[in-house]
Image (spheres, rainbow, N blue to C red):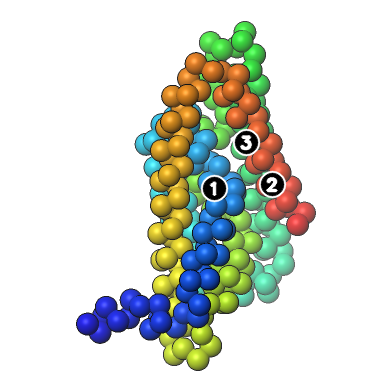
Amino acid sequence: MHALALLSPANAGIADFSSYLLGTLLIILLPGPNSLYVLAISTQKGWRYGAWGAIGIFIGDSILMIAVSLGAASMLISSPVLFQTVRIAGALYLGWMGLGLLRSGQQRWNPASQANIYEVQARLMQLHPLLAALSLSLTNPKAIFFFIAFFSQFIRPDFAHPAYTFMYLAVVLQIMSMTYLTGLIFAGQYFSNYFQNRQRLAAGLWLITGMLFIGFAIRLLFA
């Protein structure tokens, strides 16, 4: 009974758990490179690749959350050079993937190159989806500061074990995130069948996704 009591948000040092759930839901639903990647890889290569991508994001986000608890944020704050290096690397990686998607979209748009579509894949699709998604997650240093800023709003200052509260909030976020990514995987599977005989629509999807990835890169680099 004591163990079950610890699972209650009220006993975990969480302030306003309902607001946390609502905020987490809205944040997850906002389009970002992680969710767009899972949708794109599921649409092009099927649910198994999407599942690998979701696992990569789960691992990456978990590593970032553990890094926060170990004080990685303090290290980044104290070393502007390190922060800038990680941020530039993340922006270059996003831009590289975006350009690959644009290239794939251009190939799909041109009927003369339809036979070579699957021979010259986008850079995004050349990597194993787990590694690609893991890299996406880990090359965003601002995610560390997001976890600190967001979680700290819901941790009661008088609670004796704030690390437990942080872990509780992290687990809830991961469960909600993986539920959403699972939905994207099934959506990608549906779109894969839908776009199979609609190459121009598929090309438009890759072009839009590529531009969004490049936009994410610019925002990460200059924000």
Q: CA distance from mark 2 to mark 3?
A: 12 Å
Q: Residues within 10 Å of mark 3 (few under 14, many from 20)?
A: many
Q: Which mark is residue 217?
A: 2
Q: In the image shown, does 99 or 152 lie closer to the viewer?
A: 152
- At x 45% / y 67%, what residue is drawn? 170
Q: The residue under label 2 is which amino acid type?
A: Ala
- Give me the disc on residue 209: 3
Q: Residue at x 32, y 81 (%)?
A: 6
| In contact (CB < 8 Å): disc 2 and disc 3 | no
Give the residue type at disc 3.
Thr
Q: What's the distance in space between the residues labelled 3 and 1, CA to CA?
A: 12 Å
- Where is residue 167? Give x, y as percent: 43, 72
Q: Residues within 10 Å of mark 2 (few under 14, many from 20)?
A: many
Tag 1 or tag 3, which sits nearer the N-term?
Answer: 1
Q: Position of residue 110 (x, y in %)?
A: 64, 13
Q: Report the residue that reaches farthest toward the left.
A: 1
- In the depicted view, which residue is nearer to us: 92 or 181? 181
Q: What element does badge 3 sit on?
A: helix
The x, y position of residue 212, in whole percent, is 67, 40
**Drawn side of residue 126 relative to residue 79, left or right:** left
Q: Would you name the residue on which mark 1 appears?
A: 34
First in sequence: mark 2 vs mark 1: 1
- The quadrant the N terminus occupies is bottom left
Can see residue 130? Answer: no
